[in-house]
Image (cartoon, helix red, strand yellow):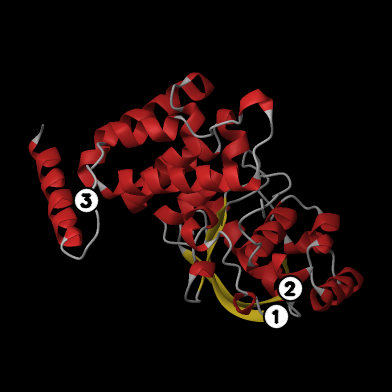
C-alpha cells in the first residue's frame, strides 16, 4: 500500500469510528478497484430477457451513483484507477473493458478531478464511440466546471427518463439550446410555453431567425458548446446526473414544482467563462413532470445564446 493509499485508508477508518460512535454501522471501506468493478457492471438485467422495471432501473442507478461518488471521494487514491480507465476509453472506445460503465466513470472522474477533468471530458464528448453518452458526458463537464448544465453540441432529441426523476427547468432549457443550436425551429417551438410561443411568432414576423444564430467560420463545427448555472438553491442548480438519487424515488413534492418560476441564469462559453446573464421564466405543463421555457423576451435569450456560441467558436479557431 502506498503512502497516499495508507492516508486515505486512515481517513476512512477515522470517519467510520466517528460515525459508529453515533450508532452507525461501520462497514469495511472498499478500494478504488472494487468501486471501479462495480461501475464496469452497470445494469443487472432480469432473467429471461425481460425489460427492467422502473424500480430496477432506479436501484441500479442509485448503486452506480453511490459507487462513483465513493470512488471520487477517495481523492488521490482513486487517481491510478480513474486515470487508467480514462486512458483506456480514449484509446480503445467501445473495445475498452471500461466501456460498459463509461458514463458513471466520467462522473467519478469529474467529481474527483474538478476543473482539471474538463479538457479530457471535452475531447471525449466528441469521440464517436460515445455518441450515445453525450448527455452523461455533458453532465460530467457541468460538474467539473461547477455549472447546472452543459450542452456540448449535437444531441438529437433529449429524452429525459422520468420514471424516477421528474423533468425540471434545466431539462427545458437544455432542449431549447439544442433546438436552437441545430436550427430546428419546429422543435424549438414544441418546447416553449405560451408567452414564448407568442414571442417566437413576433420574431418570425419581424426578424430573420438566422440572424439570431452565430455565423460560424469555415472549418469550425456548426454548433458551439454552451453552459449555464442557475442561481437558485437546491437540486435544480445541479447537473441532472449529480442530483442525489436518494431524494428522487417516491419523493416528488408538488411544492418543489411551482406552476411558473423565474430563475436568474448565468451562461458560459464552452470553457466555462461567463458570457451572459438572463432571467429565464419557466412554466409547468402536464402536471409536475414537464417544464417549458416561457420567456416573454425570447429574442433577448436567443441573443445571449448567440453571443456565448460566438465566444465559444472564437476560442475553437
- Please give the label number shown on residue 260: 1
The answer to whether any part of residue 313 appears in the image is: yes
Which residue is at a point 22% across and 42% down the rendered structure image?
28
The residue that appears at 54% across and 45% down in the rendered structure is: 136
Numbered mark located on residue 26 in the image: 3
> Dot 2 lies on which element?
strand
Q: Decide: few, some or many residues near mark 3? Use Cα within 10 Å; few <14, some 14-19, many ≥20.
A: some
Q: Secondary structure at mark 3?
A: loop
Residue 17 position within the rendered picture, expressed as x and y whole percent measured from the top left? 14, 56
| Above or below for 130 versus 135 | above
How much space separates mark 2 and mark 3, taking CA atoms? 44 Å
Farthest residue, direction top: 95
Q: Is residue 283 above or below residue 226?
A: below
Residue 217 in sight here: no
Residue at image coords 54%, 59%: 149
Horizontally, residue 118 falls left or right of residue 249, namely left
Q: Left of 101 or right of it: where is 262?
A: right
Q: Position of residue 257 (x, y in %)?
A: 64, 75
Q: Which residue is mark 2?
A: 284
Q: Which image quarter: residue 156?
A: top right
Amino acid at each position: 500500500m502506498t503512502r497516499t493509499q495508507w492516508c486515505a485508508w486512515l481517513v476512512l477508518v477515522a470517519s467510520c469510528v466517528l460515525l459508529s460512535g453515533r450508532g452507525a454501522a461501520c462497514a469495511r471501506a472498499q478500494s478504488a478497484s472494487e468501486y471501479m468493478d462495480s461501475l464496469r457492471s452497470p445494469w443487472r438485467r432480469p432473467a429471461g430477457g425481460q425489460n427492467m422495471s422502473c424500480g430496477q432501473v432506479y436501484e441500479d442507478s442509485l448503486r452506480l451513483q453511490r459507487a462513483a461518488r465513493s470512488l471520487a471521494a477517495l481523492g488521490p487514491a482513486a487517481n491510478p484507477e480513474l486515470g487508467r480507465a480514462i486512458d483506456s476509453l480514449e484509446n480503445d472506445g467501445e473495445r475498452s473493458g471500461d466501456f460498459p460503465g463509461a458514463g458513471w466513470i466520467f462522473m467519478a472522474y469529474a467529481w474527483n478531478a474538478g476543473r482539471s477533468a474538463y479538457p479530457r471530458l471535452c475531447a471525449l464528448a466528441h469521440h464517436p464511440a460515445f455518441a450515445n453518452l453525450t448527455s452523461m458526458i455533458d453532465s460530467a463537464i457541468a460538474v467539473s466546471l461547477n455549472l447546472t448544465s452543459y450542452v456540448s453540441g449535437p444531441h438529437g432529441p433529449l429524452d429525459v427518463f422520468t420514471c424516477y426523476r421528474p423533468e425540471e427547468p434545466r431539462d427545458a432549457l437544455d432542449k431549447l439550446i439544442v433546438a436552437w443550436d441545430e436550427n430546428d425551429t419546429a422543435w424549438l417551438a414544441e418546447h416553449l410555453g405560451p408567452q414564448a410561443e407568442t414571442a417566437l411568432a413576433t420574431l418570425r414576423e419581424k426578424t430573420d431567425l438566422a440572424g439570431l444564430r452565430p455565423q460560424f467560420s469555415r472549418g469550425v463545427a456548426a454548433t458551439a458548446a454552451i453552459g449555464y448555472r442557475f442561481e437558485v438553491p437546491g437540486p435544480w442548480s445541479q447537473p441532472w446526473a449529480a442530483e442525489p438519487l436518494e431524494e428522487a424515488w417516491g419523493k416528488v413534492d408538488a411544492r418543489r414544482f411551482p406552476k411558473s418560476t423565474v430563475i436568474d441564469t448565468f451562461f458560459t462559453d464552452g470553457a466555462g467563462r461567463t458570457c451572459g446573464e438572463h432571467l429565464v421564466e419557466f412554466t409547468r405543463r402536464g402536471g409536475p413532470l414537464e417544464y417549458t421555457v416561457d420567456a416573454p423576451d425570447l429574442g433577448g435569450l436567443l441573443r445571449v445564446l448567440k453571443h456565448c456560441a460566438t465566444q465559444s467558436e472564437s476560442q475553437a479557431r
